[in-house]
Image: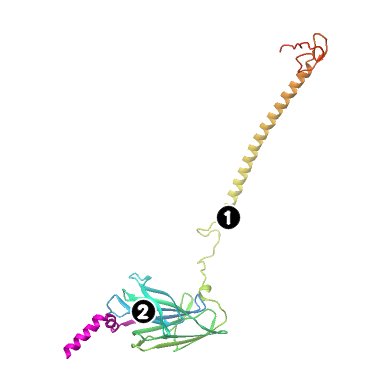
Amino acid sequence: MRKWFSILVLAIFLVFPSLAFAQTKITLASMNVQLWPEYDQPSMLVITDFTAAANTKFPVDVNFRIPLDANLIAVAAYAEDGNLINAVFEGPTASGEWQVFTVTLEAATARFEYYQPITFSGNQRVFSYLWDGDYAVDAFDMRVLEPADTTSLTTVPKLNSISQENGLKYFKGESVKLAAGEQFTLNLQYNKTTDTLIASSQAVQPSAPVDENTPGRVSLNNYLPYVIGGVGVLLIAGGFVYYLRSGRSTSKKSRRRAHSTNTESEEEDEELYCPQCGTRAKPNDRFCRVCGGRIRRAEG
């Protein structure tokens, strides 16, 4: 009887290998969740960094659930040099009140990010975070970034540790150990006098005053004398060329007028008469207009 039972169990694992894989227990060595309210959008940016336990065999698929109204924007893995690279994942797909996605881990540490709506009521904002407890976590940490222009901020459970980083204020709680199936909830409430986002208020500022002497800065004042000098040289050169051309043109016109005047004068001074009848002829006449005799011209 036991023999047939063992054969049946083995057959089930062979036919449904995913069922056998689902029974594998995955433990997370750490999980660090950061809540950034109204960072670059009027919603909650949830950043989750997690590390699989040291005894995890890679590659391995890890499933996560996020709220149904969340917008998953990034799934990445940490390379050996500490930089983030895109990770292989599937989903998310809706499953009841959740969305489920699967990350294929090639190394121990990875990250996923999503946006989730915040409840607005005048100047008051309310948000609730829930870790569903799918995996056991040896060290679970929560950190909350204080939004811009916040007058008061409270969390349940209370986050006692406060730190300043790059001009931003963070609230952090103590690490807790969570068993598989054990949930963790954090309720956040704060009052805010404006709609200013953290990203917009953290505009890049110069490390030193910017003036004409700043390296890499091009100032018109430094080059203005050269520009004016260059324009002056061009104007002088253009005027000189115009003077030469206009002088030549005037000289040619004068010579043409003088030549024309001399020719007319010579023609007017030359008086021609018909040798037969004595009638005065015009400068261009070759024959007499009266008798038809040939007009004799003086040889030049």
What's drawn in magenta, residue-wise?
A: 1-30
* Disc 2 to disc 1, C-alpha distance: 54 Å
Q: Quadrant of residue 78?
A: bottom left
Question: Left or right: 58 with respect to 193?
Answer: left
- Which part of the image, by quadrant, shows the C terminus? top right
Q: Taking 63 as reference, is 227 above or below it?
A: above
Residue at the top extreme, as displayed:
276
Residue 76 figure quarter: bottom left
Nearer-the-camera pick, 210 or 275? 275
Q: Is residue 124 left or right of residue 108?
A: right
Q: Residue 144, position in %: x, y?
A: 45, 82
Q: Nearer the viewer, residue 125 or 142?
A: 125
Residue farthest to the bottom, as pictured: 1
Counting labels gives: 2
Of callouts 2 and 1, which one flags the residue occurring earlier in the amino acid sequence?
A: 2
What kind of residue is marked 1? Answer: Leu
Residue at 25 percent of width and 81 percent of height: 15
- Which secondary structure lies at badge 2? strand
Tell me, for residue 50, which label it has, or none.
2
Find disc 1 in the rendering and name its residue. Answer: 220
Looking at the picture, does residue 214 appear above or below residue 109?
above
Relative placement, left or right, of 26 versus 35 is left
Residue 202 in percent (x, y) is at 51, 73
Task: Identify the coloring.
Answer: rainbow
Q: Nearer the viewer, residue 230 or 19?
A: 19
Instruction: From the image, state whether disc 2 or disc 1 is nearer to you.
Output: 2
Label 1 packing within 10 angstroms: few (<14), some (14-19), many (20+): few
